[in-house]
Image (cartoon, helix red, strand yellow):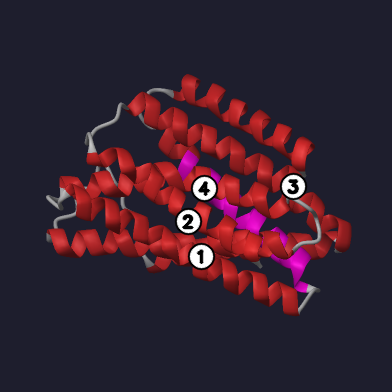
């Protein structure tokens, strides 16, 4: 439980770490943003396909893993339909600052719930080091997300300090959902493989639906591609070393 709390806290607070530079400057080149997003995508793909899914297959039949992956994908789809996706840099929606800011914060907060569940389920697994690897992967994904949320809020004339605090708070929900995921799969051990595959489905949805398109939308596809492969190899190396 102590390791879960530490891992969930560090993963969630990576959102704040990502938002920290906003206190000093309020712009970042598209190139570096795309490289960072693609690197994160590679990390998450490797975590899903080389750690979460293989671990689930060790203790459950293939059909259960398929159901878990599909359920994770469907949950993210439902969340997206409930809270519309808004391009944080190119939004043209004509609503007031307060309403738009609230919509963005709500979307990111809901988006973070299955990520926290992924961390909690991973720590309930019997595989040593899996929880740390998944919290690391989620944390890497949270960092650029925190920066973009804070940047959006600043562009909406929110003060830098308030934008930093609000962006950090969006990640805090992962601590709560991480604890829920941990206790749910700890009490009902049969849910562990289902939970692991659910986490994999949620992460793969984020990668394909959000991170890859975002990293290829500004003319830096080649740099983003190499960054994706590098992230993939880094995470595979971590899985081999500590998983």
In the picture as drawn, the residue positioned furthest to the front comes out as 2
Q: CA distance from mark 4 to mark 1?
A: 12 Å
Q: Residue at x 78, y 53 (%)?
A: 128
Residue beneath label 4, please?
139
Does the residue at mark 2 contact the one at mark 1 (Cβ under 8 Å)? yes
Q: Nearer the viewer, residue 206 or 193?
A: 193
Percent x, y of residue 54: 80, 50
Percent x, y of residue 25: 22, 34
Q: What span is colored magenta in the figure?
A: 191-211
Q: Judging from the image, what secondary structure is the residue with disc 4 in?
A: helix
Percent x, y of residue 64: 79, 65
Residue beneath label 1, please?
175
How packed mark 4 is, by other alpha carbons closer than 10 Å (few <14, some 14-19, many 20 or more), is: many
Q: Residue at x 44, y 53 (%)?
A: 13
Q: Earlier in the sequence, mark 2 or mark 3?
A: 2
**Magenta-span inclusion, residue 192:** yes
Q: CA distance from mark 3 to mark 1?
A: 21 Å
Residue beneath label 2, please?
12
Does the residue at mark 3 contact the one at mark 1 (Cβ under 8 Å)? no
Q: Earlier in the sequence, mark 2 or mark 1?
A: 2
Residue beneath label 3, please?
51
Whether residue 46 sits left or right of residue 157 in the image: it is right
Whether residue 139 sits left or right of residue 52 in the image: it is left
How packed mark 2 is, by other alpha carbons closer than 10 Å (few <14, some 14-19, many 20 or more), is: many
**Magenta-span inclusion, residue 243:** no
Q: Nearer the viewer, mark 3 or mark 4?
A: 4
Q: Judging from the image, what secondary structure is the residue with disc 3 in?
A: helix
How packed mark 1 is, by other alpha carbons closer than 10 Å (few <14, some 14-19, many 20 or more), is: many
In the picture as drawn, the residue positioned furthest to the bottom comes out as 187
Above or below for 5 versus 14: below
């Amino acid at each position: 439980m102590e390791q879960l709390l530490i891992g969930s806290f560090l993963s969630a607070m990576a959102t704040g770490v990502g938002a920290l530079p906003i206190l000093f400057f309020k712009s970042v080149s598209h190139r570096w943003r795309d490289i960072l997003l693609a690197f994160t995508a590679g990390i998450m793909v490797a975590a899903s396909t080389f750690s979460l899914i293989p671990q689930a297959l060790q203790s459950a039949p293939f059909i259960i893993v398929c159901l878990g992956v599909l359920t994770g994908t469907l949950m993210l789809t439902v969340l997206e339909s409930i809270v519309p996706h808004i391009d944080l840099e190119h939004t043209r929606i004509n609503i007031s600052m307060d309403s738009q800011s609230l919509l963005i914060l709500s979307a990111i907060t809901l988006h973070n719930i299955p990520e926290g569940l992924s961390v909690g389920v991973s720590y309930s697994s019997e595989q040593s080091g899996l929880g740390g690897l998944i919290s690391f992967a989620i944390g890497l994904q949270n960092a650029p997300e925190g920066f973009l949320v804070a940047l959006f809020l600043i562009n909406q004339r929110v003060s830098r300090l308030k934008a930093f605090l609000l962006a950090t708070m969006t990640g805090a929900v992962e601590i709560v959902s991480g604890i829920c995921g941990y206790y749910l799969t700890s009490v009902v051990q049969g849910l562990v493989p289902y939970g692991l595959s659910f986490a994999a489905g949620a992460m793969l949805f984020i990668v394909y639906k959000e991170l890859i398109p975002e990293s290829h939308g500004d003319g830096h596809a080649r740099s983003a591609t190499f960054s994706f492969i590098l992230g993939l190899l880094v995470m595979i190396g971590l899985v081999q070393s500590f998983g």
